[in-house]
Amino acid sequence: MIHFSTSATTSLCLAAASLLWVASMSLTGCSWFRDKPMQDTTAWDYVAPPPLAANPAISGEEGMGLIENATIHRLPTYIERRPLTEIFNDSNALQLQAAVENGFAPVTDLRTAYAIDRPLFKIYSCDAYMVDELKQSVPYLVPKAAQLLKEIGYAFQDSVAARGGKRYRVKVTSVTRTEHSLAQLMRRNRNASVNSCHRYGTTFDISWVKFDCMDPSMVVSLEDLKNILAEVVLDFRQQGRCYAIFERKGGCFHITVR
């Protein structure tokens, strides 16, 4: 019997997950469905657009969208004036149920990686959103979740522009976790749970403390960007498209597709 080290097993699992379905479809990009009706399907004929990386000169210190000596502009926001932790408080149990229904079985080893019975789409920085450096997760989602993420990204940009702002992208800070990466995360983050929805390919985190500023001619208040993002996430939640938790300490909206 051949024995693999933990790191080798993890690499094999990720490689297997990455290669599944590639032969039968293109991996997702960001602009294909923007002007098309929502589709509840598992695969599309798709030509992925080229990645769009952040401009370090614009992104600013710590990638927070801050630009030295820039004038900070305020935009109108309409989110209800009460703690966002009260507005976005869907329980982990509720999200976990949706994750199990819409996702794949958690990847624990090479066998379970090959047993994934749903297509996986790779996400990467593009015109709808920026994928931050992922230290404890891999950039793959099931199609419904990938589509939801892109629609949230575009809706955020449209909302900022409609109020007089210029180009910003939301930042995705966590995507799908394997059992191995989850165990590593739990050692240093007590908010991480062994029953994490991130194991199913249905869940992603969008930062509310870091945004990608793509036009330095107009820098918007981080508070206003946070509240506009909250309006967008709330709209999709009210449509029955997702569950969401506002993580104050984690600095993100934790979102699971429904």
Image (cartoon, rainbow, N blue to C red):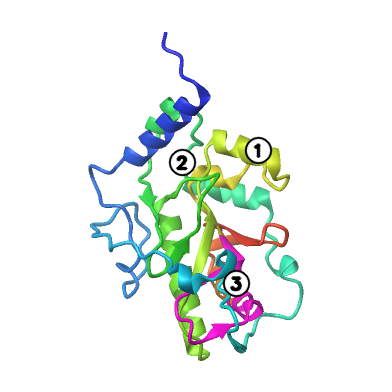
Q: Which amino acid does label 1 sit on?
A: Val
Q: In this view, does 158 lie above or below 113?
A: below
Which mark, by number, is residue 234? 3
The residue range painted magenta reads 206-228
Residue assigned mark 2: 104
The quadrant where residue 224 appears: bottom right
Left or right of residue 11, residue 85 in this image = right
Q: Earlier in the sequence, mark 2 or mark 3?
A: 2
Q: Which amino acid does label 2 sit on?
A: Phe
Residue 220 on the magenta segment: yes
Q: Earlier in the sequence, mark 1 or mark 2?
A: 2
Q: What element carries label 1?
A: loop
Residue 83: % across, % down: 76, 72
Q: In this view, does 70 lie above or below 13?
A: below
Q: What element carries label 3?
A: helix
Left or right of residue 86, residue 4 in this image = left
Q: Between 194 and 44, which is closer to the camera in this rendering? A: 194
The quadrant where residue 145 appears: bottom left
Can you tell which of label 3 and label 1 is closer to the viewer? 1
Q: What residue type is labelled 3?
A: Leu
Q: Between 5 and 178, which is closer to the camera in this rendering? A: 5
Whole-angstrom CA distance, mark 1 to mark 2, is 16 Å
3 and 1 marks in contact (CB < 8 Å): no
Q: What element carries label 2?
A: loop
Residue assigned mark 1: 194
Q: At 56% across and 33% down in the image, what residue appears?
A: 180
- For disc 1, the neighbor class at 10 Å (few under 14, some 14 to 19, many from 20) is few
Residue 244: % across, % down: 62, 61
Residue 225: % across, % down: 59, 77
- For disc 2, the neighbor class at 10 Å (few under 14, some 14 to 19, many from 20) is many
